[in-house]
Image (cartoon, rainbow, N blue to C red):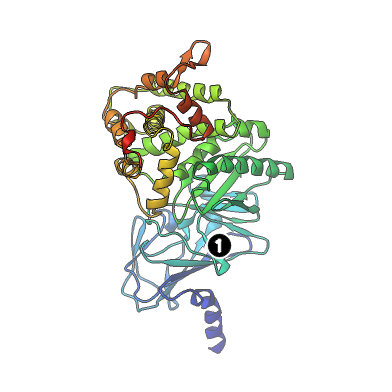
Amino acid sequence: MLSRLLAVALLLAPCLDARAGDDRLHARFSEDLNTVSAELCFAGEAPNRLYRHNDAGNHASPIHHEGATLPVRIAEDRVYLPDLPDDACLSWTYDLGAAAHAGGYRTAFRAGDSVLAVTSLWYWKGPWTRPLVVSVDLPEDAHFSTPWPRDSSDPKRYRPVQTPSGWYARSAVGRMRFQSLDVPGGEVELAILGNVTDAQADKLTRWIRRSVDAVTPVFGFFPRKHTQVVVVPIGARNEPVPWAHVVRGGGPGVQFYVDETRPLTEFDADWTATHEFSHLLLPYVTRRDRWLSEGLASYYQNVLRARDGRLSDETAWRKMHEGFERGRKATRRESLEEATRGGWRNTMRVYWSGAAMMLQADTILRQRSGGRQSLDTALKALHDCCLADGKLWRASEVMETLDRLTGMDVFMTVYRENVPRLAFPDVTGTFELLGLDPGYRGMEFEEEAPLTGVRDAIMTGEARPGRPGPGSDNAP
């Protein structure tokens, strides 16, 4: 009996070492990474439900409490608990190997000696408002890549950012190439999975490093203090980065699925990484308004590559114009709001309408403020005052806040003029003011145009004095 109590005490030890008031979850991965044993201990009163992935039950054991199976009711992603005593501890195991065999890219899969999985398959927790600390036991030489920031007092312990339970994330565990990239204002934890050569790993690291560095000057620091970056080699494809995405659950994470055989020049010429990291300049915007988040990233994917020298100014403006043309040709007789709800068939309309609106707003703000303000400075003000990781924003709320911070009615004017419209945003007047002529010979610059200084400043990131326009008296 004594030995059994001692074993229980050792299992609970990582949980007992957390701050009072924190729920504590301890996860232990088996040597072959096929099994995760989890124990969740509540601080004080237990919640009436846990949240987990919809598919978690397919490969999970029953939940146990004090050595007995706990009677629960399951509804989609929620596990409803019976009444439990204060400070109760629950335990379960998850068959990560079976999930990786069955899941594919959507939920869980193996990449070399690692497993990348939606974290909430095995990471179950109470309502997101309850603070939680997570400790992880790993096999020897294994690493754990997660969006969660590390606890400052213990590098093996994590404090997931308190975000709504429906915001998902992915974590990788196993033997991978893992390193922390120091960036101004924080760190980027880079994990390269799969069987890659040293040369390929070096190439992918240089590509990520350059893409991170491209976004950093917008604020003067990287927009998030801790960011997970996972690179997953998937073999020969038609392009270097077939797909990528940003996740926000428990903290920001960016995942890239790449053709590791392609040369560095192709990765540097690709827009995807700059686009994805640009998403982090904004708080999390609802998918109903993804024209804003995707439009801003589409705008910056060209602007930032011009600023760091990967594109010439002429090429960046030409690529932006070509994007606008794709968006215009994909526009049907429906408003931007309706198109955004229409799914992926409207991708070009949605992405490039948002980018056109960002160009309009950036141009007007720079003109009216005489170069003192820009989209860069407005977004930094939003970051400094209002960024809350657990908050989901509507586009109108973002635009109204940007107007309040800049002291000008710019963003909501652009919003009102374009979101209800059936047509693609008209950038003809903006191009004329900037001295941009997208003729058949390519993008030409008109040096006598009124806002040539603004045109140059957009692509350099510098503040350029210019002729203040209407509304400049309102500039702070």
Q: Residue at x 35, y 49 (%)?
A: 392
- Tell which of 286 and 242 is nearer to you: 286
Whole-percent x, y for residue 256 in the image = 55, 42
Whole-percent x, y for residue 313 in the image = 55, 25
- Tell which of 46 and 411 is nearer to you: 411
Relative horizontal placement of residue 428, taking residue 204 as reference (left or right): left
The outermost residue toward the bottom is: 2
Whole-percent x, y for residue 358 in the image = 40, 32
Binning the other alpha carbons within 10 Å of mark 1 as few (below 14), some (14 to 19) or many (20 upward) gives many
Q: Residue at x 49, y 51 (%)?
A: 224
- Tell which of 394 and 116 is nearer to you: 394
Q: Residue at x 47, y 26 (%)?
A: 453
The outermost residue toward the top is: 440
- Visible in this render: residue 421? yes
Residue 288 falls in which quadrant of the image?
A: top left
Q: Say which amino acid is labelled 1.
A: Thr
- Visible in this render: residue 262? no
Relative horizontal placement of residue 279, taking residue 71 as reference (left or right): right
Whole-percent x, y for residue 304 in the image = 53, 34
Residue 287 falls in which quadrant of the image?
A: top left
Q: Is residue 304 above or below residue 79?
A: above
Q: Is residue 8 above or below residue 442?
A: below
- Tell which of 35 and 412 is nearer to you: 412
Relative horizontal placement of residue 198, taking residue 386 as reference (left or right): right
Q: Is residue 247 above or below residue 243?
A: below
The residue labelled by disc 1 is 35
Say what secondary structure mark 1 lies in.
strand
Which quadrant: the C terminus? top left
The outermost residue toward the right is: 198
Q: Is residue 36 above or below residue 70?
A: above
